[in-house]
Amino acid sequence: MSKLQDWKTNLTRKQRVILLIVVAVVVLALLTATVFRDNVVSFFRWATYSQQNDSFSHNAQSNSLFMGLEDNLLICTQSQIQLVSPTGTSRVQESVEMTTPALNASGEYAVVYDVGGQELRVIGEEALLHSLTLSEEESILCATINEDGWVAVTSKVSGYKGVVTVYNQNFETVMTIRLSSRYISDAIVTPDCQGVYLISPGQAEGSFENTLLYYTFSSNETPTRTLSLGSNVVLSTHSASRCWILGDESLLILDSSGVITASYDYEGQYLKMASLQGDGFATLLLSRSSSGSGGNLVTVAADGTPYGSLTLDGQPMALAAQGHDVALLTTSEVITADRRLDGYRTTPNQQGIRNVAVYSDGSVALINSAAVSLYFPFTGTRVEADAANQENG
């Protein structure tokens, strides 16, 4: 301690000033990196890729699926599954035969399957992890995956109304539920990998009703809890820290024990687009009109409260999210923002962009009919939230 005091005493005034400036710069840099960490990562990606070709061609069709999966782009067509880097470097390339490809993703994992068919593939860790081909007597209705790589496959099997098979991260069968009394349209493994939620459509007093069945893996095929979802039609599910159930009337958020912990009601608005891929939030585009342009963009936290909202004009074409970032494509522009929606950046849609995907660092894949290009939102035009809402108000 005395050596440190002697060293401080021996410093000249000029040296002390320089030392103070250096400390201040380091602290400021750390604060900037913490507050703007996504932009910092995106900037370094821009610095790395600006010297390379940031556009690559694809052979996907208009009905193909695109999704940002961590630092890569997942492309699913009827004949091929590809995982490629932002500059087109191939990570995975798998030939398939799928009539109606669909996908579900969480964290670094994704499951790609053929609706009404027999083929399923699991992608993760930048590799093809597992393959499944059902017998011709079976067909896949839906498949989901949680952030630990556990898969729930809902299938149609002769003699049963609903069959769900749960696979662990090693794709070993953990549980199979066969129901003769209830139809099952969807299922998803809980975030703690101790149970599974089943969606069962049916009727109550002559009206449509969705029922949520919660099974633990030790429940011996008997539901631990049964919950009514009312007339809410389930459109999509997601499992990461919480279970998210996207309905046509409201968004439901559940823990791993069969309890609805929060919800967000659309209050009569139409759900035009949505993404459940954000880190701890859902992104909804709601509108008072079922067919008009524009709408209210809302990001909803796990406690059911909005992170933010923006009223936007333009005819929406695609919506994507990952990490803390959101991208909305309209016929006239590409809009990007973080989940707080306290402002956004925009750039014109001048290249015939038809779809977008968000990478984990906030950069965006702009997808047209033949190629994918890399876009860095910090290069766009900044629009403050208050000014934007006043213009659209």
Image (cartoon, rainbow, N blue to C red):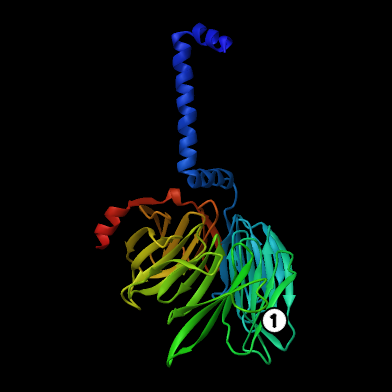
* Image height of 43 relative to 122, above or below: above
| Rendered location of residue 5, percent (x, y) | 53, 10
Q: Quadrant of residue 269?
A: bottom left
Write the residue at 43% across / 60% down: 303
Q: Is residue 350 left or right of residue 42?
A: left
* Image height of 264 relative to 338, above or below: below
Q: Quadrant of residue 184?
A: bottom right
Can residue 59 be spotted in the picture? no
- Image quarter where the C terminus lies is bottom left
Can residue 387 be spotted in the picture? yes
Question: Quick one: 140 or 294, which is closer to the camera?
Answer: 140
Write the residue at 71% across / 69% down: 94
What amino acid is labelled 1 in the image?
Gln
| Secondary-structure class at tag 1 | loop
| Rendered location of residue 50, percent (x, y) | 55, 46
| Rendered location of residue 131, percent (x, y) | 73, 71
Q: Is residue 137 left or right of residue 253?
A: right
Q: Is residue 7 left or right of residue 99?
A: left
| Rendered location of residue 166, percent (x, y) | 67, 73
Write the residue at 49% across / 39% down: 33
**What residue does disc 1 label?**
118
Q: Quadrant of residue 190?
A: bottom right
Number of numbered discs visible in the structure rendering: 1
